Amino acid sequence: MSTFANKVVLVTGASRGIGRAVALAFAAEGARLVLAARSPDRLAEVEEEVLALGADALSVQTDVSVPAEVAALADAAMSRFGRIDVLVNNAGIGKVGEVAAGTFAEDLRLTERASLFGMIGVTQQVLPILRRQGEGAIVNLSSVMGRKAFARFGSYAIVMHAVSAFSDALRQEVAADGIRVSVIHPALTATDLLRDADVAEMPPPFRHMTPLTPDDVAKAVVAAVRHGKRRVVLPRTANVLLLAEAFSPRLGDLVATALTKRRVASLLRMSRGKTYHETISAAHSR
């Protein structure tokens, strides 16, 4: 029997991208899903996919930045299933732009509201449930940007750093309650996060990088919960960048600059085929 058979997994941002892939990955493991996102139509489609895998599902239209909707989400999950075993905080947005841009502060506020304070709000609603149960797992989606910022992605990196810090603090605070906390740091992933950004606007290391697939990240999420992993970096070779940054910001900047060269990115297995925009365009043309 699967580790997750009949476990209740709540996924935010579940209507597409990583959230959808995570929901389907847990459904394939026999879990029961609570699907939360702002788009009811897309949620309904993902719910149908979950049901087609033989798993149970509850869809709750939710804007994680609205406290009343987050409270209603937790209430709906408990009313339907009576417990929550795993919370996957995935909902969020990202904006591209230089620090000097006039929109930078507003981009930061919007990203904080959805990607950080929304995560905090959902966690605070679910945490008392997990504590009463004496067990559970929380997975927070951050980014490689949560350990090393790239030029033109400062607002997103600030928030992802905050997600990392939030996860580290939370993990220590709830360890004695039988609750495990994992934070996932994917590199560039083939979601719609940067779909509207021109190639020239992209952070330089991203421009020829081959993105991870949402399924890659979903597998890492499931494995993190199964094995109690505290931190996961995808792909593993991205740890070269993070180790360089931890040793010296100068080295971290040198590696970030080196990643703008296709040969270096290829050596680190981060440029292996289509670029982000080529991958997204192909996906939407199907």
Image (spheres, rainbow, N blue to C red):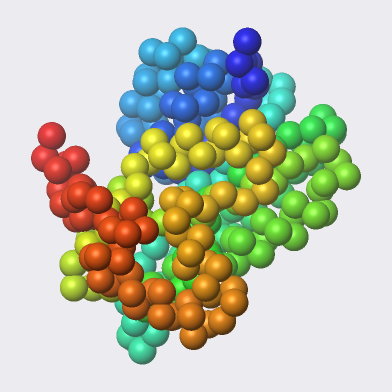
Quadrant in the rendering for residue 45: top left
Q: How many marks?
A: 0
Q: Would residue 225 appear left or right of 257 to someone viewing this image?
A: right
Q: Classify the position of the C terminus by image quarter.
A: top left
Name the residue at 52% across, 67% down: 242
Q: Residue furthest right?
A: 176
Q: Would residue 14 appear left or right of 82 to someone viewing this image?
A: left
- Is any part of residue 123 visible from this angle? no
The residue closer to the viewer here, 285 or 237, is 237
Q: How far across and down, in percent of the image, does residue 245 sit?
A: 53, 75
- Is any part of residue 120 visible from this angle? yes
Q: How far across and down, in percent of the image, does residue 10 sit?
A: 58, 33
Q: Would residue 109 appear left or right of 259 to someone viewing this image?
A: right
Q: Would residue 189 appear left or right of 167 to someone viewing this image?
A: left
Q: How far across and down, in percent of the image, does residue 111 sit?
A: 46, 65
Q: Classify the position of the N terminus by image quarter.
A: top right
147 vs 171: above or below: below
Name the residue at 49% across, 85% down: 250
59 vs 63: above or below: above
Name the residue at 62% across, 21% down: 4
Q: How far across and down, in percent of the image, does residue 65 sit?
A: 53, 55
Quadrant in the rendering for residue 264: bottom left
Name the residue at 57% across, 54% down: 118
Q: Residue furthest left?
A: 285
The residue closer to the viewer here, 122 or 198, is 198
